[in-house]
Amino acid sequence: MRFTAKVISGRGIGRMLGFPTLNFETPKNFKLAEGVYACSVNFAQREWEGVLFFGKRKTFADTKSLEIHILDEVIKDTPTEVEATIVKRIRGIKKFPSQKELVIAIAQDCAKAREILNGVGD
């Protein structure tokens, strides 16, 4: 699945956890099961590898979010719009008992996404 989305300001939760994200306005007619996905993202005339989260941030009792953590990069100039391609679902969403356990899960999601995007994980 490929989509284009406008970047919006987030609450800084990903940055606070050590996994900064680009947050997006959910496109109209967006049909994706809630969960965590390996993805590629295009902006600034470059393709980036990422981990996409879509759904309710249950650990923070928060509203739905569409966001992408760019793997192994620090994005200095936030784009206004990106094109993303979802490669493979990693897992569904869940509520973690603590932020520490959430951080561990995100690190595992990033490792799995790297495997998938590099053709190692199936």
Image: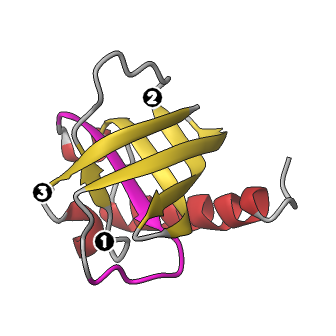
Q: Residues within 10 Å of mark 3 (few under 14, many from 20)?
A: few
Q: Earlier in the sequence, mark 1 or mark 3?
A: 3
Q: Look at 15% across and 56% down and name the residue there.
A: 10
| Helix, strand or loop at mark 3 | loop
Label 1 crowd bin: few (<14), some (14–19), many (20+), radius 10 Å: few
| Residue 78 x %, y % | 24, 70
Question: Extreme front residue here?
Answer: 45
Q: CA distance from mark 2 to mark 1?
A: 21 Å
Q: Mark 1 — residue?
A: 17
Q: Which residues are magenta?
A: 63-76
Badge 2 amino acid: Glu
Disc 2 residue crowd, few under 14, some 14–19, many 20+, Cα 10 Å: some
Residue 67 in magenta stretch:
yes
| Residue type indicated by callout 3 | Ser
Q: Which of the two labelled residues, at mark 3 and mark 2, occupies the earlier sequence position? A: 3
- In the visual, does 86 lie left or right of 10? right
Q: Secondary structure at mark 1?
A: helix
Q: Nearer the viewer, residue 54 or 104?
A: 54
Residue 24 lies in the magenta-colored region: no
**Given contact means CB atoms under 8 Å apart, are the residues at marks 2 and 1 in contact?**
no
Residue 109 picture quarter: bottom right
Q: What type is the residue that disc 1 sits on? A: Leu
Residue 105, percent from left and from top: 52, 59
What residue sits 69% from the left and 66% below the top?
114
| Circle 2: element type | loop
In the displayed structure image, the side of residue 96 where residue 60 appears, left or right: left
Instruction: Please name whichever residue, 41 or 63, is drawn nearer the observer in this view of the structure.
Output: 41
The residue under label 2 is 34
Whichever of labels 2 and 1 marks the residue nearer the N terminus, that label is 1
Q: Which residue is mark 3?
A: 9
